Each structure stands twice: as structure tokens, then as C-alpha cells.
Image: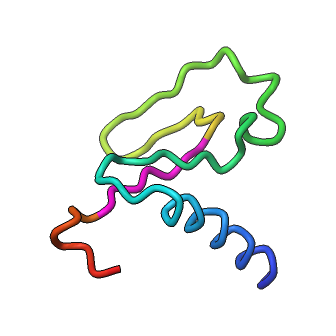
């Protein structure tokens, strides 16, 4: 379990090192979609007050600090 966390952490942080501009960056957890999503591909994502469902390609959006405030 710890190894999986370490690999996931590296994959999430590695793109940040490669791109240093201030533009938001989207990191997909599964580039081809979440495992098992094929049967539900045509269902649209839904977002209401405090919940979101039918997410078939989850991602993390990184908003880096502006260059003048980034401490590294």
C-alpha cells in the first residue's frame, strides 16, 4: 500500500517539475479513463450543490503559485 502511494505521489508531482509556468495543469489519474468505465462511457457527468457523479476520467488540476511568490 505504501509503495502504491509513493508511486501515485511521484506521478502527481513529476509533471509539476517539468512545467514551471503559472498556467493550471490537469493531471489525469488514468489517461484512458478509470478502470471499468467502458459500459458507462455515454453517461454525462453531473454536479450539484456538494456532489459530483459519473466521473469516468478523474483528474487533479494543479494551480501553481505565481512565479514571484513560489518558494520552490
Number of numbered callouts drawn? 0
Give the quadrant of the C terminus: bottom left
When the figure is inspected, residue 29 is found, relative to residue 40, above or below; the finding is below
The span picked out in magenta is 58-64
Horizontally, is 26 left or right of 31 in the view? left
Residue in the image at 61% along x and 45% along y: 28
Q: Residue at x 43, y 50 (%)?
A: 61
Q: Looking at the picture, how far across and down is residue 68, in whole percent?
A: 16, 69
The answer to whether residue 22 is left or right of residue 43 is left
Question: In this view of the protein, which residue sits in the foreground, 4 or 18?
Answer: 18
Looking at the picture, how far across and down is residue 48, in whole percent?
A: 35, 35
| Residue located at (75% from left, 34% from top) | 32
Q: In the image shown, does 1 or 66 lie closer to the viewer?
A: 66
33 relative to 71, above or below:
above
Decide: is 71 above or below 8: below
- Rendered residue at 65%/50% (across/down): 29
Amino acid at each position: 500500500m505504501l509503495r502504491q502511494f509513493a508511486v501515485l505521489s511521484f506521478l502527481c508531482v513529476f509533471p509539476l517539475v517539468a512545467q514551471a509556468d503559472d498556467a493550471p495543469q490537469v493531471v489525469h489519474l488514468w489517461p484512458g479513463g478509470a478502470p471499468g468505465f467502458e459500459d458507462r462511457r455515454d453517461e454525462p457527468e453531473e454536479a450539484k450543490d456538494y456532489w459530483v457523479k459519473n466521473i469516468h476520467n478523474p483528474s487533479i488540476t494543479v494551480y501553481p503559485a505565481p512565479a514571484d511568490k513560489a518558494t520552490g
